[in-house]
Image (cartoon, coloured by chain):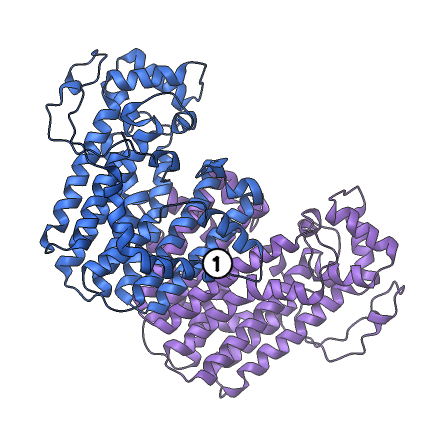
Chain colours: A purple, B blue
Amino acid sequence: MSWKDNSLHLPSLRSAPSLPRAGVKQKGLSVGVVIPLEDKSPETGIAGLVALVTPDMERVNAMILSRTGSDVTMIPEVANHLISSGGKRLRPMLTLATAALCGYKGEGHIKLAAAVEFMHTATLLHDDVVDQSDMRRGKLAARMLWGNEASVLVGDFLLGQAFKMMVEVGSLSCLDILSTAAAIIAEGEVMQLTAAKDTATTEDAYLAVIRSKTAALFAAASEVGPLLAGRSREYAEACRSYGTNLGVAFQLIDDALDYGGTAAKLGKNVGDDFREGKITLPVVLSFRRGSETERDFWRRTLEKGEIAEGDLAHALATMRKHRALDDTVERARHYGAMARDALEIFPASPWKQALLDVVDFCISRAH
Amino acid sequence: MSWKDNSLHLPSLRSAPSLPRAGVKQKGLSVGVVIPLEDKSPETGIAGLVALVTPDMERVNAMILSRTGSDVTMIPEVANHLISSGGKRLRPMLTLATAALCGYKGEGHIKLAAAVEFMHTATLLHDDVVDQSDMRRGKLAARMLWGNEASVLVGDFLLGQAFKMMVEVGSLSCLDILSTAAAIIAEGEVMQLTAAKDTATTEDAYLAVIRSKTAALFAAASEVGPLLAGRSREYAEACRSYGTNLGVAFQLIDDALDYGGTAAKLGKNVGDDFREGKITLPVVLSFRRGSETERDFWRRTLEKGEIAEGDLAHALATMRKHRALDDTVERARHYGAMARDALEIFPASPWKQALLDVVDFCISRAH
């Protein structure tokens, strides 16, 4: 669920035409099919959105700062350790942008955007405890500095503050969307816990997990914009669909990046999911497309956690052989295309263009 | 924050007149002052309320059951392990009773009562992780059966479901009260974490913690009743004050019970707080009233956690010497009296009587 900082140094942004899925059926091929891609500057991807939201985002940042305040000094310490650690604040940007896209002229989007970021931060704090992670966004995880206790409780505090801000905005439909998302996110995390280390997980089951744990907040963050603006169901659904599909694409790219993306080289931060035994789409595809010997390899390393020297390199080679990373990116492109099409009912505007470019940005991270 | 099951077998219910606080200044006295108490059947205390709320409570229980449902089977398993483990559901009863006291005729109190119980259950699940507790309500804690991960995430799920139910009721003022309580509870827990193991904690500082971590939910549970019923601020404040003071009294009695109450004998479940190094009011009073040698004892056992054979018995003897348990109960009586007076603006009714009796019930648990 993390936005991996190391993934943000992008060589180029490309979008792919449809291609014969040669690698899927030709098991045993050890070379990946090179996908022809357009060249496009990566910065265009998110710079447009960042420029447009900057005035509002400064107010969101001020709101975030004021709402982490507490006489209990550990609360702002723990909260700000994570909040100020260089997350890109993509989720609150979606709330600001979809509100603007829909012509919203009020003030509620600032608090809702801050609430969305708090929900996300609370999830990260709790995730680190659940995954026993040592690092987050290139820094020590809060739990390593203040303990699991503080991470659990400060997460709860931020969730409470998020709901307070939503209540202050006073839109019951937005409250409905965001509180439902909170329950669904937790449900997705439990689902992942249950499915954890099961190499036989199907692609569908995996998609159900990431729809809940990642895409639900992208969807809610995007849907409250049109709801605030009082737009009809049609436009709210369009923004929701945009958010859902962007969220799925985002998570799939994150999964590919954990193995170094399509330009996979062994390097720092590559293989965290592998070492933690996480079953993500690259593994799901490699397992299904692999030989029985290869399946035994995945069972030994991911289910049993018996990882020896050279196993990560072997995992990467096996993924390459089965085009697992290329096809994970390919799948992400599919959801990215759905996200873009969802917005097509809106007339052309700088906001619409910025939201469309974000899709390309998310996918381009993998190269 | 737990309602300790072993504390519910009550020998008798008594309420005490004011007494000279002999024990406070006469340090070195090794006998406690026996407080004369009225005799009253303990069951009267809560039986009246239980009888009145039973029809509504059955609907709350059905709501709770339906809202813990999920296709992710671990969620109902973990949630129901705790929910069906014999908690007395005092907090949702407060919501039902204050709504009825204020003449509410609608349906919203059912969902709000269920939401209050979910908030409480989520807190217990997270508390067990924070305190690394093995047991809860005489059963293995959920975290011992399903792991810390599940306890954190199912707690988050229940919080999300609680907010969903509140949103469905649609009262922004109730949402405001309950979401504020959620943030305050977490703040109180962090405060406790910060103050943990500090024997120099003052009574005021300790009260600030329990006002947040325990009384805030009692207050919110009691305030939403009059708000639902559309009663004026005066009545909402009265119910809130009732809840706050009942909550403080309840927690103080819980603290005394952890050392066996005023009839302190070494027995099962006595001394959990001592072994965990928790600073509660009996310790605060004993530390302040004690000699330097005694203070060294508290520092060694509670701050450093160096507990030897016989230390719990010595702690109990020291508490008895300084009347620390009697005076903790005495303090609880003070808050109980405030809770009762808060309700006095309401005309006589069976609901009012039942709520008044609950105060006596809570305090009588200590004998």
**Spot occupied by residue A62 in the image (x, y as percentages of width and height):** 35, 59
Q: Quadrant of residue B214?
A: top left
Three-letter code, disc 1: Thr
Closer to the camera in the image, B360 or A2: B360
Q: Which residue is mark 1?
A: B68
Q: Quadrant of residue B280?
A: top left
Tell me if residue B116 can be seen.
Answer: yes
Give the residue at x 87% y 58%.
A291
Where the N terminus of chain B falls, by quadrant?
Answer: top left
**Spot occupied by residue A41 in the image (x, y as percentages of width and height):** 62, 72
**Spot occupied by residue B176 in the image (x, y as percentages of width and height):** 29, 61
Mark 1: few, some, or many residues within 10 Å (few <14, many ≥20)?
many
Give the residue at x 15% y 42%.
B338
Give the residue at x 39% y 60%.
A61
Instruction: Return the chain for callout 1.
Output: B
Q: Is residue B106 above or below residue B290?
A: below
**Spot occupied by residue B79 in the image (x, y as percentages of width and height):** 49, 52
Tell me if residue A73 can be seen.
Answer: no
